[in-house]
Image (cartoon, rainbow, N blue to C red):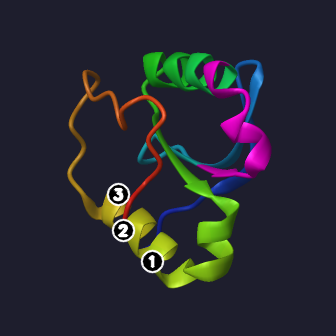
Amino acid sequence: MEAFKFRRQQQIGSYIADFACFEKRLIIELDGGQHSIDIEKDKQRDDWLRSEGFEVVRFWNTDVFENIEGVLEAIRNRLLAPSLGPSHQGMEDGDRSKY
């Protein structure tokens, strides 16, 4: 996408990212219903990934199925936005990307 390469099911530390763009330090996660149950586990995972310099963006599976163009546009916007440096913390806990 926009000449940025993503790796699918990429191991980072002890976690597996759904999609990872190392050039932009961006991780895209696609979440099913089980993620609404185990929120604390996702928070710990995202906190660790952020501490390693990644931005984590999550989308619900239903968003992908019902509005793929909106999801792709949100990802494209993240890729083209200027990096905010190591202090950037990404989304607030529990938020999913909005488009």
The residue segment tinted magenta is 29-40
Give the image quarter of residue 83: top left
The percent position of residue 79, horizontal first and vertical second, equals 37, 59
Pointers 2 and 1 in contact (C-beta within 8 Å): yes
Q: Who comes first in sequence, dot 3 or dot 1?
A: 1
Distance from the alpha carbon under mark 3 to that under mark 1:
13 Å
Q: CA distance from mark 2 to mark 1?
A: 6 Å
On the image, the x and y values in percent for residue 47 come to: 50, 19
Identify the residue under disc 2. 99
Tell me the number on the disc at residue 55: none
Amino acid type, residue under disc 3 in the picture: Arg
Crowdedness of circle 1 by 10 Å Cα count: few (<14), some, many (20+)? some
- Magenta run includes residue 33: yes
- Residue 1 in view (yes/no): no
In terms of sequence position, does the residue under pointer 3 or pointer 2 come before the other? 3
**Secondary structure of the residue carrying numbered label 1:** helix
User: Is 88 left, or right, of 34 in this rendering?
Assistant: left
**Structural crowding at the residue carrying mark 3, measured as other residues with C-alpha within 10 Å and reported as few (<14), some (14–19) or many (≥20):** some
Q: According to the image, label 3 marks what residue?
A: 78
**Which amino acid type is marked by label 1?**
Gly
* Tag in front: 3 or 2: 2
Q: Is residue 91 above or below residue 65?
A: above
User: Is residue 73 toward the left or the right of residue 42 in the image?
Assistant: left
Front tag of 3 and 1: 1
Q: Which residue is mark 1?
A: 70
Q: Circle 2: is it few (<14), some (14-19), or many (20+) Cα within 10 Å? A: few
Front residue of this view, candidates 84 and 37: 37
Element under disc 2: loop
Identify the mark nearer the N-term, 2 or 1: 1
